[in-house]
Image (cartoon, rainbow, N blue to C red):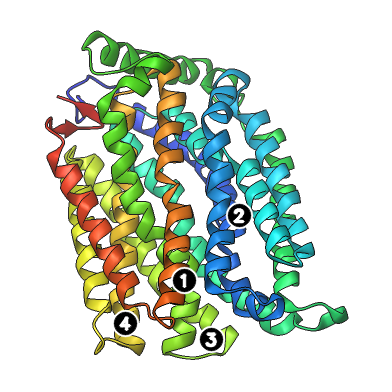
């Protein structure tokens, strides 16, 4: 019996990887839900916070995006530390720290404190996502990786599905309780679970298969040996960078960074502005906004898992990223038309969100195929940190455009359309076909 990449496998391998997935993915999945929720719940807080504090659209966009400046500065060193100290302690530390900063946002009183705490939140969370992507390479080989990343990243969509209704309910139900506005309660109530989860990670997560007490000796050996063989093969074939310097000098790392930037620009357009779009086109009711905002993320959750599984089964990567980007680009362009408003606009945003998340479900299988050793920690962090600067650029640009155009979303949606089309073209322009996360 052989795997999709032609490597011989034991018939029992699948059950061992399933065992590892059932143990690891749920805790990583739930942790990422909390991370993403604490990152983007400012989009719901905006519905009350801006008027309470007198913040302009530009000021909100700057505050929402400045998170990614702190994220960018500390991302690479954080991931290198994780590679040396292990995921358990470092991921646990990250979660506890960001939970504390998320709670402190209750004390925002003006632009300055808003910017400061958003920046510190980015510093605190830096290294979490690329750390998990690196961590998954310790456990799962290329032919399993896209579906594992898809299951993990479905947390973004689930955060939208459950986070929207919860955030809307908190805003509506707690507003004025104990003399505190609903947006402050939102930061308070949604920050605390991250601290608790960080403590759980400290006691639950295993750094590698060798440390997993829930695996037999044979299972530990198989998982460790398989990961080592895959890394050695990439290095022997000359397709993988191993050192930090090599990762920075690899032109494909920078191409992947640009692709990720273009996709993330659209992702945070949805994440930070969807509640506002619903408020302006369908209803101002905060609870209703929460429930309606869950619809696009529900579609995205299903689409990205299906796309990731199909990509792993076929071994094809490029079109599983490019085609969803093209679909998202077309959907954004249609949603920008003046005749497409209200619920028809939500339908197009469902397609756009599903396309973005489907592309992301397969994206990380590509760079992991050209990086190994220390380069994997540095390269994955570089791609993620550079790409996530779009998280700063996106809300900043949207805020400026909306202030300059009388709060119009039309040019903004065209911007996202162009960005996703650019991502698709960059994927298709990568010269060498990628199979099972590996250059051939």
Query: CB atoms at circles 3 and 4 under 8 Å apart?
Result: no
Q: Considering only order in the chain, which callout, 2 or 4, is on the residue closer to the N terminus?
A: 2
Disc 4 target residue: 345
State whether residue 395 is above or below residue 435. below
Residue at figure coordinates x 59%, y 48% from the top left: 31
Q: Residue 382: x percent and y percent?
A: 43, 32
Q: Considering only order in the chain, which callout, 2 or 3, is on the residue closer to the N terminus?
A: 2
Nearer to me, 152 or 171:
171
The CA distance from mark 3 to mark 2 is: 22 Å
Q: Residue 396: x percent and y percent?
A: 47, 61
> For residue 282, which quarter of the picture?
bottom left
User: In the drawing, does residue 254 fall left or right of residue 21?
Assistant: left
Q: Residue 50: x percent and y percent?
A: 63, 76
Query: CB atoms at circles 3 and 2 under 8 Å apart?
Result: no
Q: Considering only order in the chain, which callout, 4 or 3, is on the residue closer to the N terminus?
A: 3
Q: Of helix, strand and loop, which one carries label 3?
A: helix
Give the foreground label among 1 and 4.
Answer: 1
The CA distance from mark 3 to mark 1 is: 16 Å
Give the foreground label among 2 and 1.
Answer: 1
Give the foreground label among 4 and 2.
Answer: 4
Disc 2 target residue: 34
């Amino acid at each position: 019996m052989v795997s999709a990449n032609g490597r011989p496998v034991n018939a029992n391998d699948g059950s061992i990887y399933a065992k590892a997935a059932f143990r690891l993915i749920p805790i990583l999945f739930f942790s990422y839900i909390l991370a993403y929720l604490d990152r983007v719940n400012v989009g719901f807080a905006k519905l009350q916070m801006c008027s309470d504090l007198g913040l302009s659209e530009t000021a909100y966009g700057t505050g929402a995006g400045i998170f990614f400046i702190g994220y960018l500065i500390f991302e690479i060193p954080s991931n290198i530390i994780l590679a040396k100290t292990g995921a358990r302690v470092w991921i646990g530390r990250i979660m506890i720290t960001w939970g504390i900063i998320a709670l402190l946002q209750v004390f925002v009183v003006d632009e300055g404190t808003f910017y400061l705490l958003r920046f510190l939140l980015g510093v605190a969370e830096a290294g979490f996502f690329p750390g998990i992507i690196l961590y998954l390479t310790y456990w799962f080989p290329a032919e399993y990786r896209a579906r594992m990343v898809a299951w993990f990243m479905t947390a973004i969509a689930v955060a939208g599905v459950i986070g929207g209704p919860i955030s809307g309910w908190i805003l509506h139900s707690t507003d004025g309780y104990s003399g505190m506005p609903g947006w402050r309660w939102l930061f308070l109530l949604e920050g605390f679970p991250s601290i608790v989860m960080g403590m759980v990670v400290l006691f639950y997560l295993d750094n590698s298969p060798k440390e997993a007490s829930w695996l037999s000796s044979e299972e530990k050996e198989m998982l460790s040996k398989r990961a080592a063989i895959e890394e050695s093969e990439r290095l022997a074939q000359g397709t993988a960078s191993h050192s930090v310097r090599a990762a920075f000098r690899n032109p494909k790392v920078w191409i992947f960074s640009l692709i990720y930037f273009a996709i993330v620009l659209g992702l945070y357009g949805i994440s930070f502005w969807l509640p506002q779009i619903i408020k302006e086109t369908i209803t101002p009711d905060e609870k209703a906004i929460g429930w309606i905002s869950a619809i696009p993320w529900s579609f995205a959750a299903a689409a990205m898992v299906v796309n990731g599984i199909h990509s792993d089964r076929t071994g094809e990567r490029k079109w599983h990223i490019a085609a969803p980007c093209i679909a998202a680009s077309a959907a954004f362009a249609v949603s920008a038309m003046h005749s497409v408003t209200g619920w028809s606009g939500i339908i197009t945003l469902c397609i756009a969100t599903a396309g973005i998340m489907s592309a992301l479900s397969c994206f990380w299988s590509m760079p992991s195929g050209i990086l190994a050793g220390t380069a994997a920690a540095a390269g994955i962090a570089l791609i993620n940190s550079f790409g996530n600067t779009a998280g700063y650029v996106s809300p900043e640009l949207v805020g400026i455009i909306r202030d300059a155009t009388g709060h119009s979303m039309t040019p903004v949606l065209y911007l996202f359309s162009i960005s996703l089309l650019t991502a698709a073209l960059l994927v298709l322009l990568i010269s060498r076909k990628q199979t099972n996360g590996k250059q051939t």
